[in-house]
Image (cartoon, coloured by chain):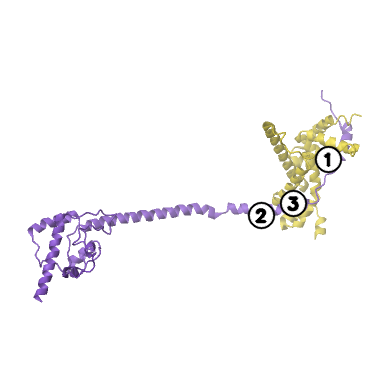
Amino acid sequence: MTNILNELKDEELIKEFQDNNTLAAYEILVKRYKDPLMNFVYRFVGDRDACTDIVQETMIKFYLNKDSYKSFAKFSTWIYTIAGNLAKNELKRRRRRNILSINNNDDEKSLQIEDKSFLAPDKATDGEIKNVIIQKALLKVKPVYREVVILRDIQDLSYEEISEITGLAIGTVKSRINRGRAYLQKLLKNIYRE
Amino acid sequence: MSKSYNNNDQSDMLKDLKNLPKIKAPDNFEYNLMTKIHNKKIGSTVNEDIHFNWVKFLAPSALIVSLGIVFFIFVSQQNKKVNSIAIVTSKIETPPLVNNSTIINKKLTDRDIAGNHSSNKKEEVEPLDVRVGNSSFDSQVNKTIITRKPIVLDEYISGHNTRKDDLKQGNVVSEGGESSSLSGLVESKKLDQKTLNKYRAVVDSIKRADSLKKAQK
């Protein structure tokens, strides 16, 4: 049964899940999308723990609201939209928290959490350091540009798919991608100077 | 001056972006997910129950209705009591009765007493002038008079009254100091000396009548 389901496309699997509530179909979709979504959300939010929670929340929403998926859309764009919205909400929440903490002067009271992206110089290779720098630069790009750049250049999605996920016109998507890239290159000019 | 970047300039950067290490989900991702889903499912059913909880909806209205019913019952009972008191007080205003046969139960108001006293002036009470077992009038009065503790008049007359408190129990010879069964609802009034003398005279006449009967036998 599982082998047969594994051969099905995403849209066929979700249809199976919708029609017959087949949990195996749901699990296959989770297996297929958990890593791409983790990658997308991590690059967007920059926090691994928060990223895991967001992707889990995405999968839960998918489970509970399976009937809201319409067959004319691609499953991948639908699930990316959910994850993207949840990631944006997380960023808004963090921004609000930062504003409150600045107002309350709670900077010193905040918990000290280990920075998992930090690499000791003796262990870090050039490539790893470069990746960390790129990730940090990516987080400095405005979220509206960051999202499309990640979807296009990291997740390797088409303009049409990005347009569907973000709900923007293709032209807007393209211009935002260009602006995002330009800003990112500006931030990384020290790396790509030579 | 803004510098424009074309794809050729960005190719290295784009290549590095594509080659960024892929982040993978933790090993226990699916297990945690299924646990969460199970919990959320329970939560959603609980919410549905809350939405359709008729008990919560009906409880306050039932309480209000029951309170209303209790209030109406209470009010109607109060009205009945007030009405019955009014009836009793109106019925109390009947002429007094002395019953030789068994039990004397009576309650007099001052107005009765005053009326009777004035009538006594015209009609003297004779020793044998006692109403015994008067039929329709008795039944009518018996309904109206208030029940009191009985006194056995024969025993009392013959002097065999062993119950010391009988005098206190009966209204005929006592001063009427005993509280009535309606005490608290009806104002109890003490008889004046004249009325008391009148009733003593009545009792004395009964005594004499009884002694005459015995003598005749």
The x, y position of residue B204, in whole percent, is 13, 65
Q: Residue furthest right?
A: A194
The x, y position of residue A57, in whole percent, is 72, 47
* Cα distance in 3D space between marks 3 and 1: 25 Å
Colour chosen for chain A: yellow
Q: Are marks 3 and 1 in contact (CB under 8 Å)?
A: no
Left/right of residue A180 with respect to residue B204 in the rendered view: right
Left/right of residue A20 with respect to residue B20 in the rendered view: left
Q: Nearer the viewer, mark 3 or mark 1?
A: 3
Check chain identity for marks 1 and 2: say if they share one. Answer: no
User: Which residue is label 2 attached to?
Assistant: B42
Left/right of residue B60 with respect to residue B212 in the rendered view: right
Q: Chain of mark 2?
A: B
User: What amino acid does circle 2 point to?
Assistant: Ile
Whichever of callouts 2 and 3 sits on the residue coming sooner in the sequence is: 3
Q: Quadrant of residue A159?
A: top right
* Cα distance in 3D space between marks 2 and 3: 14 Å
User: Which residue is label 1 attached to?
Assistant: A154
Colour chosen for chain B: purple
Alpha-carbon neighbours of circle 2 within 10 Å: few (<14), some, or many (≥20)?
A: few
